[in-house]
């Protein structure tokens, strides 16, 4: 008797799961990009969203939600319904913001357990960019000037503890210099301010500045990678210049924790399709960021390691209000 009841219940549950799988996605999907247009997250998100939409059979609509180094958009995504119709294209500030909030004595905007990694698309070292007419021809020129004039050189970022703030503080710690930090709502506005002469430098993903480098408006002095970049072969690493500073700005897809496994797996498959799409590769590579795809298991492990590394960096940075 009980065996028949449990069997019937199991069949009903399986049928319901199959129906849910067949119905997803049942409406357009919103991809939250926690930065304004023009930055790496937006550059990656738009072609990826188009490719995922073709695979999923529903539009994937970009919603730019900038502020707090990406924290506002990531918090919004973490609180969304876990039904696969809200997804997030995050950057590596994901690994920093909860630690920074805790350091500042406030409740984290989101927790590491509130969002689930699905796939990584890019992982680029940030580059140190200045205007083409700036007096610094090398990173050593830049550092020597900063030592002579503590606090006089200012740099822009996407917000406190964000992906443009952290690498500059890593450089400052290793080079023994002091600069003035000017936060913006995203990489796009920060680069516009650099072009307009309101700030002196930025540390940004290559995709955000490469077009301006090619146009002769910006110069890249060095980058935070382990080896030279194909897109900028003449630009040295900071390690080559004598500074033990490394940092990678990655972009990856997340969903709210609690998203049903069949839906997470469907999004995982669509992300894989997007990463292998010729148009996606062309657009992102053209911006200076080659696809460095990681599927769910590898990306989960990568994020866990990044969280541990960034906890140490945040502690050294201390409180930044």
Image: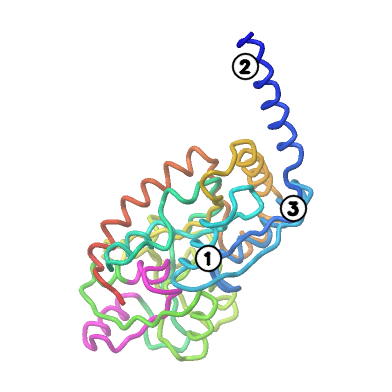
Q: Position of residue 76 (x, y in %)?
A: 53, 62
Classify mark 1: residues with Cα within 10 Å, few (<14), some (14-19) or many (20+).
Answer: many
> Do labels 2 and 1 touch, CB within 8 Å?
no
Q: Which residues are magenta?
A: 139-168
Q: Residue at x 51, y 90 (%)?
A: 196
In this view, the residue in front, 320 or 207, is 320
Residue nearest the viewer, comparing 221 with 18: 18
- Specify few, some or many for label 3: CA neighbours under 10 Å numbering under 14, 14-19, or 20 or more: some
Q: Which mark is residue 73?
A: 1
Which of 15 and 5 lies nearest the eye of the viewer? 5
Disc 2 from disc 1: Cα separation? 43 Å
Residue 285 sits in quarter = bottom right
Left or right of 140 in this view: 222: right
Residue 53 shows which numbered tag? 3
Q: Secondary structure at mark 3?
A: helix
Q: Report the side of 194 relative to 244 (left or right).
A: right
How much space separates mark 3 and mark 2, taking CA atoms? 39 Å
Would residue 195 be found to the left or right of residue 7 on screen? Answer: left
State the residue at coordinates (57%, 73%): 36
Image quadrant holding the C terminus, namely: bottom left
Question: Which callout, 3 or 2, points to the residue nearer the camera?
Answer: 2
Residue 104 visible (yes or no): yes
User: How many residues crowd around disc 2 within 10 Å: few (fewer than 14), some, or many (20 or more)?
Assistant: few
- Can see residue 228? no
Q: Is residue 178 above or below residue 4?
A: below
The magenta stretch spans residue 170: no
What percent of the width, then of the height, locates residue 11?
Answer: 70, 21
What SS does tag 2 mark? helix
Residue behind mark 2:
6
């Amino acid at each position: 008797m009980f065996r028949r009841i449990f069997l019937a219940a199991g069949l009903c549950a399986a049928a319901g799961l199959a129906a849910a799988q067949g119905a997803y996605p049942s409406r357009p999907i919103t991809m939250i990009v926690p930065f304004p247009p023009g930055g790496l997250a937006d550059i990656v998100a738009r072609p990826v969203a188009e490719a995922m939409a073709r695979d999923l059979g529903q539009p994937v609509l970009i919603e730019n939600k900038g502020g707090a180094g990406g924290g506002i958009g990531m918090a919004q995504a973490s609180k969304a319904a876990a039904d696969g119709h809200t997804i997030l294209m995050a950057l590596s500030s994901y690994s920093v913001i909860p630690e920074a909030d805790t350091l500042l004595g406030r409740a984290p905007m989101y927790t590491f357990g509130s969002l689930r990694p699905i796939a990584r698309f890019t992982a680029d070292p940030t580059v140190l960019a200045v205007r083409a007419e700036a007096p610094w021809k090398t990173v050593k020129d830049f550092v020597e000037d900063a030592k002579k004039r503590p606090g006089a050189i200012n740099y822009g970022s996407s917000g406190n503890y964000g992906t443009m703030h952290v690498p500059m503080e890593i450089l400052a710690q290793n080079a023994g210099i002091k600069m003035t930090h000017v936060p913006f709502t995203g990489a796009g506005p920060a680069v516009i301010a650099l072009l307009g002469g309101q700030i002196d430098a930025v540390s940004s993903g290559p995709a955000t500045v490469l077009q301006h480098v090619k146009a002769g408006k910006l110069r890249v002095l060095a980058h935070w990678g382990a080896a030279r970049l194909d897109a900028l072969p003449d630009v040295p690493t900071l390690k080559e210049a004598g500074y033990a500073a490394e940092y990678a700005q990655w972009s990856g897809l997340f969903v709210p924790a609690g998203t049903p496994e069949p839906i997470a797996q469907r999004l995982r498959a669509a992300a894989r399709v997007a990463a292998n799409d010729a148009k996606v590769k062309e657009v992102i590579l053209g911006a200076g960021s080659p696809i460095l795809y990681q599927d769910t298991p590898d990306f989960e492990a990568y994020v866990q390691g990044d969280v541990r590394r960034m906890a140490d960096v945040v502690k050294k940075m201390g409180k930044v209000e």
